[in-house]
Amino acid sequence: MTDTVTLTTGSRMPLLGFGTWQITGDDAFRASSTALEVGYRHLDTATVYGNEREVGRALAESGVPRDEVFVTTKCPPDRAGRELETLRKSLELLQTDHVDLWLIHWPGRGSVNVDLWQALVEAQEGGLAREIGVSNFDAQLIDEVSKAAGVVPAVNQIEWSPLLYDAAVVSEHQERNVVLEGYSALRGGTLDHPAIVAIAERLGRTTAQVIIRWHLQHGFVVIPKSVHPERIRSNFDVAGFALTDEDMATMDGLSG
């Protein structure tokens, strides 16, 4: 599974990544290790997840060259004023000299977003983060930080699934050349939705595989997570089939 999207400064971000939210301790190490063994080349973590050390250890011990893995971490807005200190701690825990993508994890209040964004730009200029972006931002907030710093976020990571699909949101990202990255794709009832179940049964695939495939065919980045090796493997096994235009339209319409 090697589908990628090219970001602002030329980095190639795999559309399919491995998410690590709510996975901690040995589970985080084992799950991340399994993901790399299966073939994932994109790992997503965050300061507040409390698992950067385990994700970093998995990467260091995997035998996979660092430059073959796209690593994302995130800075919470309460670290305003200590952004670079936060990133350096992340780099230490991840055992790397840079991350491929550093995000503002969620919006702060007032002028905090602009201050945070200026710090992310500084980190990028200093080579500590190859690409920078945001998470849980709307178009207005993206425009606010872009205007203030003269740098547009490469990525916006938001909650996203067929049940949350919104063509207007897609257009807003495309118009700004911001990559839409979705999280929690397999939550909120998507796995049990009758229309998705029907497509999965027809194709002989799992509903999770169908949902992941929907993201990839749209060009959305998706980061499913699991601690179960068989699911980690299954969620990566999405290259051998395709959804029809009708399937895509059906799934696009589930948010109505």
Image: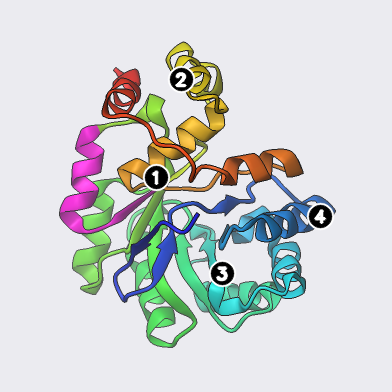
Cα–Cα span, label 2 and label 4? 33 Å
Task: Describe residue 149's horizontal placement relative to residue 189 as left or right.
Answer: left
Cα–Cα span, label 4 and label 3? 21 Å
What percent of the width, then of the height, locates residue 145?
Answer: 27, 63
Cα–Cα span, label 2 and label 1? 16 Å
Q: Say which of 79 and 169 sits in front.
A: 169
Q: Describe the element under mark 1 as helix, strand or loop.
A: helix
What percent of the width, then of the height, locates residue 185?
Answer: 49, 35
Q: Say which of 192 and 99 sits in front.
A: 192
Is tag 2's residue or tag 3's residue first in the polypeptide sequence?
3
Magenta-tinted stretch: 167-181
According to the picture, the residue beneath numbered tag 4 turns out to be 25
**6 w.r.t. 224: above or below:** below
Is tag 2's residue or tag 1's residue first in the polypeptide sequence?
2
Residue shown at the point (74%, 59%) measured from the top left: 33
Is tag 1's residue or tag 4's residue first in the polypeptide sequence?
4
